Image (cartoon, grey):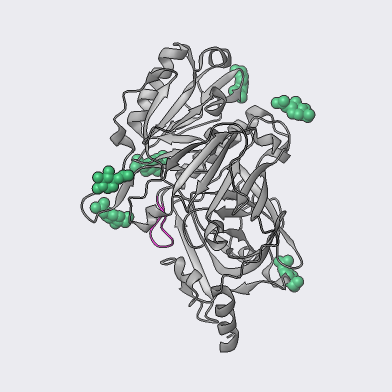
C-alpha cells in the first residue's frame, strides 16, 4: 500500500501534463519499416505486410469492456518508431497508429502471464528510476474509461483494452520517452498481460497511438498537429520515414498542397477517436465509378443510435479496405482497363478469400494500370499512382493492395500513403497532403 502522500504527489505530477520538450520545434521521430532489418525481398515484404493486415482485420472489432474504439483499432502496420524509455534507457519499438490512442509496450510483468515475441528486451519497470504509476483518480486514468480500474493495493491505474483477437491489460505509468529530437514525459500502458498469439506484432514491442483521445501522443504533448512521410514500401534499404509532432509538422516545398476537412459529425466518442475523411467517389484513370457517395457516409443508425460507416485514414493499417459496393465497382473497372488476364493470388496467402484477390501479371499492371483518384467533398482529390495501390507479390504478379470491407467502414491504409507528406492539423480540423520524396527528408 503506497502512502497517501505518494499518491497525491503522483496526481500532481501527472495532472500537470509535465511535458518537457528539449527541442522547441516539437518532436521529430524517425521511423523504420518493420521488415527493413529482415533482409527480405520486396515480394516477401509485401506478403508479410498483407499477412499483418489480415491479422489486423481480424482484430478490427472490440470485444465488450475495455476502451471500445470501433472500428479501426491498434493495427499491425508497417512503420515503427525506435526510441528509449526510462533511466537508464531501455529500448522500445512501436508501430505508429492513427487508428488508436494508447501508447503501450510489453513489460516484464507479462512473463508470468503472456508475452508475444518482440525484437527488443521487455521493458522492466523495476529497473527504471523515472517510472511513476498513474493514480486511478488522475484524469489520464479516467480518460481510458471504461477500461480503467483501481488497483486496490495501491490506488494505481489499471487499464484493459479488449479486441476480438486479444485483450491487453496492465498498469498505466508515466515515463521519460527519449526520441531523436528530445525527451518528453508520457503516460503509457505497461502491458502485463495479453493474449495475442506468439507472433504478436511481428517484431515491434508496442504501439504509439496518434488518435484524438486523451492518451495519444498528440493529445499528451498538446500538439495541434502532426505529420508523417512514409518511404516507399518497395525500397530495399533501411532509409527512415519521418513523424513530426507539434511545430515541426509542416508541408514545405514546391509540390501542391491539397486540404480536406475532417468529418466532425459524430458525437460518439468511440468514433470521434478516429480521423474520418469525407470520401465521395473514386475514378480509375478518367473514368468516374458509379458509386453512390452515401456508401461512404458516416451515419447514425436511428436517433441516438450507434454510428456506422465512414472512411478512416489510418497509418497503422497496411492496405485499404473499401465497402462492398465501392470495391465491386473498382474491381470491375480495373478488369476493363487492365484486361481480362487476371491471375490467381500467390499461394500461402489468404484463406478467408478477403484480401488481395485481384492480381494480374506484373507486365499488364506496369503497362496498363491507371491512376486511382480518391475524390473528397469540397473538390479535393488524392491521386494514387499505380505504385500506391499495386503490390509486387513475386512470380511476376502484382495484386491490388485494396480489399473488400465486410462491414460498413472503409479504411485508407498506409500503402496508399507512400511518398505523400500527410499533415493532420487538429486545430484547423483538416488533413493536408502533398506528394513528396519521403526518402530524401
Ligand atoms: C536487396 O538488397 C540485397 C543486398 O543489397 C540484395 O541481396 C537483394 O537481392 C535485394 N533485393 C531486391 C528485391 O532488390
Ligand atoms: C528487472 O529489474 C530488476 C531491478 O534491476 C531486477 O532485479 C529484475 O531481475 C529484472 N527483471 C527482469 C525480468 O529482468
Ligand atoms: C451531419 O449530420 C447531418 C444530420 O444527420 C447530415 O445532414 C450531414 O450531412 C452530416 N454531415 C456530415 C459531414 O456527415
Ligand atoms: C449499439 O452498439 C451496442 C454495443 O456494441 C450494441 O449492444 C447495440 O445492440 C447496438 N445498437 C444498435 C441499435 O445497433
Ligand atoms: C511461384 O511459382 C512457383 C511455381 O508455380 C510456386 O511454387 C511458388 O510458390 C510461387 N511463389 C510465389 C511467391 O507466388
Ligand atoms: C468479417 O470477417 C471476419 C473474418 O473473416 C469475421 O470474423 C467477421 O464475422 C466478419 N464480419 C462481418 C460483419 O461479416
Q: Tell me the residue at 43%/54% (across/down).
A: 273
* Image height of 255 relative to 111, above or below: above
Residue 20 part of the magenta segment = no
Measured as percent of width and height from the top left, residue 308 is found at 32, 46
Q: Nearer the viewer, residue 229 or 122?
A: 229
Q: Nearer the viewer, residue 420 or 163?
A: 420
* Image height of 408 relative to 266, above or below: above
Measured as percent of width and height from the top left, residue 153 is found at 54, 82
Left-right relation of 360 to 302: right
* Image height of 283 relative to 324, above or below: above
Left-right relation of 352 to 91: left
Q: Name the residue furthest left.
A: 303
Specify the quarter for ligand 4: bottom left
Residue 64 part of the magenta segment = yes
Q: Tell me the residue at 38%/59% (across/down).
A: 64
Q: Nearer the viewer, residue 191 or 249?
A: 249
Q: Nearer the viewer, residue 434 or 62?
A: 434
Q: Quadrant of the C terminus?
A: top right
Residue 362 appears in the picture as rendered: yes
Q: Tell me the residue at 43%/36% (across/down).
A: 321
Figure quadrant of residue 439: top right
Left-right relation of 58 to 32: left
Q: Which residues are magenta?
A: 62-70
Measured as percent of width and height from the top left, residue 254 is found at 61, 32
Amino acid at each position: 500500500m503506497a502512502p497517501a502522500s505518494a499518491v497525491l504527489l503522483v496526481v500532481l505530477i501527472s495532472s500537470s501534463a509535465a511535458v518537457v520538450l528539449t527541442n522547441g520545434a516539437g518532436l521529430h521521430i524517425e521511423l523504420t519499416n518493420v521488415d527493413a532489418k529482415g533482409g527480405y525481398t520486396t515480394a516477401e515484404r509485401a506478403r508479410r505486410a498483407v499477412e499483418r493486415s489480415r491479422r489486423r482485420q481480424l482484430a478490427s472489432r472490440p470485444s465488450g469492456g475495455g476502451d471500445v474504439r470501433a472500428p479501426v483499432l491498434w493495427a499491425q502496420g508497417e512503420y515503427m518508431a525506435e526510441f528509449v524509455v526510462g533511466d537508464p534507457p531501455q529500448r522500445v519499438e512501436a508501430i505508429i497508429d492513427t487508428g488508436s490512442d494508447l501508447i503501450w509496450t510489453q513489460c516484464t510483468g507479462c512473463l508470468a502471464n503472456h508475452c508475444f515475441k518482440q525484437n527488443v528486451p521487455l521493458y522492466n519497470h523495476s529497473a527504471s528510476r523515472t517510472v511513476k504509476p498513474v493514480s486511478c483518480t488522475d484524469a489520464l486514468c479516467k480518460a481510458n474509461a471504461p477500461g480503467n480500474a483501481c488497483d486496490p493495493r495501491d490506488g494505481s491505474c489499471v487499464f484493459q483494452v479488449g479486441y476480438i483477437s486479444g485483450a491487453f491489460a496492465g498498469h498505466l505509468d508515466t515515463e521519460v520517452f527519449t526520441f531523436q529530437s528530445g525527451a518528453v514525459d508520457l503516460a503509457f500502458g505497461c502491458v502485463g498481460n495479453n493474449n495475442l498469439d506468439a507472433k504478436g506484432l511481428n517484431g515491434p514491442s508496442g504501439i504509439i497511438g496518434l488518435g484524438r483521445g486523451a492518451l495519444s501522443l498528440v493529445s499528451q504533448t498538446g500538439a495541434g498537429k502532426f505529420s508523417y512521410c512514409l518511404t516507399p514500401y518497395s525500397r530495399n534499404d533501411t532509409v527512415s520515414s519521418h513523424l513530426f509532432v507539434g511545430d515541426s509538422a509542416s508541408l514545405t516545398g514546391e509540390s501542391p498542397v491539397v486540404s480536406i476537412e475532417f468529418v466532425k459529425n459524430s458525437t460518439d466518442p468511440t468514433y470521434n477517436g478516429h480521423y474520418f475523411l469525407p470520401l465521395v467517389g473514386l475514378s480509375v484513370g478518367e473514368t468516374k465509378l458509379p458509386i453512390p457517395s452515401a456508401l461512404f457516409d458516416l451515419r447514425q443508425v436511428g436517433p441516438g443510435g450507434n454510428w456506422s460507416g465512414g472512411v478512416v485514414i489510418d497509418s497503422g493499417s497496411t492496405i485499404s479496405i473499401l465497402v462492398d459496393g465501392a470495391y465491386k465497382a473498382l474491381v470491375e473497372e480495373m478488369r476493363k482497363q487492365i484486361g481480362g488476364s487476371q491471375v490467381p493470388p500467390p499461394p500461402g496467402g489468404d484463406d478467408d478469400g478477403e484480401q488481395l484477390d485481384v492480381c494480374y501479371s506484373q507486365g499488364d499492371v506496369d503497362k496498363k494500370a491507371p491512376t486511382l483518384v480518391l475524390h473528397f467533398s469540397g473538390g479535393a482529390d488524392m491521386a494514387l499512382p499505380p505504385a500506391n495501390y499495386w503490390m509486387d507479390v513475386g512470380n511476376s504478379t502484382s495484386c491490388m493492395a485494396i480489399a473488400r470491407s465486410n462491414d460498413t467502414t472503409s479504411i485508407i491504409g498506409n500503402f496508399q500513403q507512400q511518398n505523400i507528406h500527410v499533415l493532420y492539423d487538429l486545430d484547423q480540423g483538416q488533413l493536408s497532403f502533398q506528394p513528396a520524396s519521403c526518402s530524401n527528408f
